[in-house]
Amino acid sequence: MTQLVRQKSWQRWILPEPAQVTRREWWFWLALSLAFSASFGWLAYQQGTAGPYVVQDDARQHVFWMQRYLDPALFPDDPIADYFQGVAPVGYRGLYWGIAKLGISPLDAVKWLPIFLGLITTFLMFNWVTFLLPIPTVGFVGALLLDQTLWTQDDLASGTPRAFLFALFLAVLNCLVRQKKLALAVSLVLLGCFYPQYLLVAAGVLIVRLAGAFIGGEKGNKFKPLKSQKIAIFGLAVAIATLTFYALQSSDYGPVVDRNLALTLPEFSPDGRANYFDNDWGDFWLLGKRSSLMPRGFLTPIPLVLGLLLPLGTVPGIKRWIQQRWERSPIYKGIHPEIHTLSHWCIASLGLFFLAHALIFRLHLPGRYTQHGLTMLMPTAAAIAWGLLTDQLFTWNNQHKQPAKARLKTAITLAISVSFTVLLLIYPATLGRYPKANYVTGETPILYEFFKLLPNTIKIAGIADELDNIPTFSARSVYTAREYGIPYHWGYYRGFRDRTIATMEALYSPDVSVLKQFNNQAKINFWLVDQDTFTVDYLEGRDRRANDWLKQYQPTQSTIIQKLQRGEQPAMVSLIPKCTVLDTGRYVVIDANCLNADS
């Protein structure tokens, strides 16, 4: 094999040998990685601050209740706010509490926090990749691919607990491979405090690592832990202690929904609010949202396809061929033995994926254990594969010295290198709206301002989709709303489901006494009603304004439809003109006291 010789400066600039890398080059590529991360975060921040009533979709569940940190009197006796506050991880709660104590609204913080999380994640990704293959351009490719992947999803942009797992898990990996004992312990505890489910993956990585060390020992020798194994044992002890702490915490919202119950609830059907059971085998196991191994578009951005090539190097025949062909390559030889951590990670994630399926919902959703991992694994593998392939491309380019062939090869090599660079850099521009932060814009400001002026003790009933936004934009309690119908904890969702059904029955009842009784028992102050509420199309989800989530509540929905088709008019219809206190054109706000006073 001819020794790889790079006589062209542009080749060294693209892929320097590990021994040739200078600190200046390392800092340059890190700075460039951070610059891209900051630009993506800034673009998302601009989306989030495009108007006074803009909020990230999932923040409507996980952040709205944090307004209590600024005003403890908000959301009194509100089971929805109590639930989302109660199930929020302790570290997540603590961070936003601290931010609120500085006088910053959590609803503002959730928009700029992803910028800093993105920068931290990028820094840790760059360090992780350059540890496995100490070439800064490889680190840049890995960091940029991770950033592009994160901003084609809304995980990071959400500012919710899952936004923190990427930085914290990468911190765990960096500390583990660098054998930083104290930092590893801190990273594991923080991961448990922000996203406990993924602490299971970290523990799984440590277990697989230790099992591999034990099995891989010499025959006849007992397992004698080296420093790296001792750190893994220490880390596993910290992870188990942290998980035990969470396991011992009592919950007011149990039990977790089991398989038998879930199969009876329309919420988990393919058309349900938390669609889990999919009729399509491929979607259920491979490309669905909650139950599957990987999300749709998991090879987005396109260069991630290179990551699929890296596992081929572990196939015995291919591995021997690579070792023979690349044995003298300084790039190949520069790969750190800790590259095996990637396989440990895969084994741990797959194991927990199938365990979560077996213990349905007790470990939350199976896809959480593989889909988030792929978000970090694929850029890592793709960057290293890019480095190895580029190394071979340059080797091929430099093997022949005939001028004609050399010029042709150089032209081909440059064309491939430039094409990949252009694809990598301009990919986001091909996606239309980017980043895809999934921000929601409130369309009825007059409604939010109206409720905001009323006492914070009011309770608003209805089934209109705009109720999803009231707790966030008005800081007032709603009796039920689609956004908060999360069915995994039966202790919470049973009450939510009962309240929704009771709301539907009262709203559509032709008997005014039923409506009055509901108002009094539920202590309703106002109703929010869509102008199309009393049509069959609205209830069936065919109307453009309709909430198709109402299909979940059977037989209530079907019974109401039958009554409307028979011509039975809800009592509310005749009372709306008299009791309306605000008409926005699409929505009307109705005074419940007026309804109760009607004879």
Image (cartoon, rainbow, N blue to C red):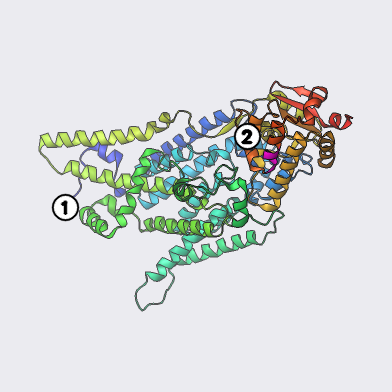
**Residue bearing mark 2:** 540
Mark 2 or 1: the one toward you: 2
Question: Percent from the top left, x then y, of residue 3?
Answer: 18, 50
Q: Residues within 10 Å of mark 1 (few under 14, many from 20)?
A: few
Report the quarter where the C terminus lies.
top right
Question: Percent from the top left, x then y, of residue 505?
Answer: 75, 39
Q: Residue drawn at (43%, 43%), measured in percent from left and top?
A: 298
Q: Which residues are magenta?
A: 555-559
Q: Quadrant location of residue 500?
A: top right
Visible residue check, residue 531: yes
Q: Amino acid at mark 1?
A: Met
Image position of 158 (left or right of 313): right
Residue 557 belongs to magenta span: yes
Question: Percent from the top left, x then y, of residue 65?
Answer: 70, 41
Q: Secondary structure at mark 1?
A: loop
- Main SS of the magenta part reads helix
Specify which label sits upstream in the sequence, 2 or 1: 1
Residue 162 belongs to magenta span: no
Q: Residue drawn at (35%, 58%), measured in percent from left and top?
A: 337
Question: Separation of disc 2 and disc 1 at Cα?
Answer: 70 Å
**Residue bearing mark 1:** 1
Q: Residues within 10 Å of mark 2 (few under 14, many from 20)?
A: some
Q: Nearer the viewer, residue 486 or 226?
A: 486
Q: Does 336 sit above or below residue 396? A: below
Image position of 526 (left or right of 100): right
